[in-house]
Amino acid sequence: MYEDNEAARQAAHRLATRRLYQCLTLFISLLITVLTGILDNDQSTRTREPYHTSVLTGEGWVMELLEGHPKRIRSELGVSRDVFLELIMELRELGHGDSRYVSLEEQLAIFLYMSVTGLTIRHVGERFQRSNETISK
């Protein structure tokens, strides 16, 4: 009989301990959620800091390649200046043109640069000073 009471008391103690841990876990989860909301709110009131801040834009880099040493454009984009300009003329004849923010020359350069280097979208975005979304379009 004494053993039955002791076993029941230990089972009740384990159950109470488990419930206490569950309550603590719930409390900590709620606390983390509230603190995350407060921190997110605090960050939304801050001024956003631009990520791409290089002086040389992607368009500027492309123009530098077109006006620079002939071997440089070949090295960076895998085609000569003449081939690059022919591709631009052909694309324009097919109806392609500048997008709202990115010139056709820069669009072609992005494509060629990715093809030649095999870099990630993030790295190409850094080279052209464009967002990952712009590069992946």
Image: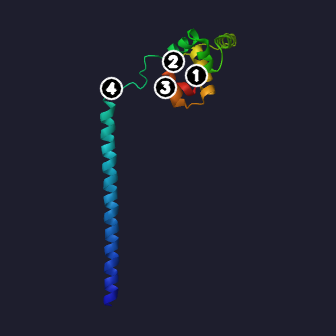
- Kindly identify which residue carries mark 4: 47
- Kindly identify which residue carries mark 1: 110
Mark 4 or mark 1, which has the lower sequence index?
4
Instruction: Measure the C-alpha gap from mark 1 to mark 3.
Output: 11 Å
Mark 1 or mark 2, which has the lower sequence index?
2
Residue 74 pos. (x, y %): 63, 18
Label 3 Cα neighbours within 10 Å, binned few <14 / some 14-19 / many ≥20: some
Q: Nearer the viewer, residue 121 or 15?
A: 121
Residue at (32% x, 60% y) in the render: 23
Mark 4 or mark 3, which has the lower sequence index?
4
Mark 1 or mark 3, which has the lower sequence index?
1
Query: The N terminus appears in which quarter of the rendering?
Result: bottom left
Query: The residue under label 3 is which amino acid type?
Result: Glu
Q: Are marks 1 and 2 in contact (CB under 8 Å)?
A: yes
Which numbered circle lies on residue 126? Answer: 3
Q: Are marks 2 and 4 in contact (CB under 8 Å)?
A: no
Q: Nearer the viewer, residue 112 or 80?
A: 80
Which numbered circle lies on residue 58? Answer: 2
Please tell me whether mark 2 sits on a helix, a strand or a loop: helix
Instruction: Measure the C-alpha gap from mark 4 to mark 1.
Output: 30 Å
Instruction: Measure the C-alpha gap from mark 2 to mark 4.
Output: 25 Å
Query: The residue under label 1 is which amino acid type?
Result: Ile
Residue 2 pos. (x, y %): 30, 89
Label 2 Cα neighbours within 10 Å, binned few <14 / some 14-19 / many ≥20: many
Mark 3 or mark 2, which has the lower sequence index?
2
